[in-house]
Image: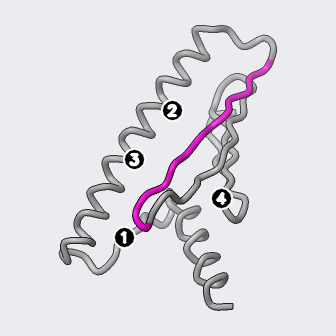
Amino acid sequence: MERGQFHFVWPNLTLNVMPGHPNLSIGPIVPTGAETTARHLDYFVGPDVDEAWLEEMLAFDDQVGAEDVVLVERVQKGVRAGGLEHGYLLPESERLVAHFQGLLVDALSD
């Protein structure tokens, strides 16, 4: 597989497959407050996956996650300060976020 796959199962479960060797990460995103969430992932890999590849994949996943946290916290800071009415989504790479927001609006509208 050349590209990662990132899936969302309503209401709060993520399933991810990184490029390369057989692997899967799965875990919930749990609200912990009005502006905070916690995330836990369990990782599963094929029996022939070597330790070096696994360490590299986990380091990359940690790096991307840390970068995402910084971006999300900055948007939230701008919204809280009144500098933004809302955050903006990138149509291609943030389809899951847009889809989640639509599901949330539908659920809260019922």
Q: Earlier in the sequence, mark 4 or mark 1?
A: 4
User: Which amino acid does the dot numbered 3 rest on?
Assistant: Asp
Q: Residues within 10 Å of mark 3 (few under 14, many from 20)?
A: few
84 relative to 65, above or below: below
Residue 109 image-quadrant placement: bottom right
Q: What's drawn in magenta, residue-wise?
A: 34-46
Indicate the secondary structure of the residue bearing disc 3.
helix
Question: What is the spatial separation of the Cα atoms under label 1 and label 3, in whole angstroms?
Answer: 14 Å
User: Depth-wise, is mark 4 or mark 3 nearer the camera?
Assistant: 4
Instruction: Find disc 2 in the rendering and name its residue.
Output: 61
Question: Separation of disc 3 and disc 2 at Cα?
Answer: 11 Å
Display coloring: one colour
The residue indicated by pointer 1 is: 88
Q: Earlier in the sequence, mark 1 or mark 3?
A: 3
Q: Of marks 4 and 3, which one's residue comes earlier in the chain?
A: 4
Question: Can you tell which mark lies on residue 65?
Answer: none
Image side of residue 23 versus residue 59, left or right:
right
Q: Assess whether mark 1 and mark 4 are in contact (beta carbons under 8 angstroms).
A: no
Judging from the image, what secondary structure is the residue with disc 1 in? loop
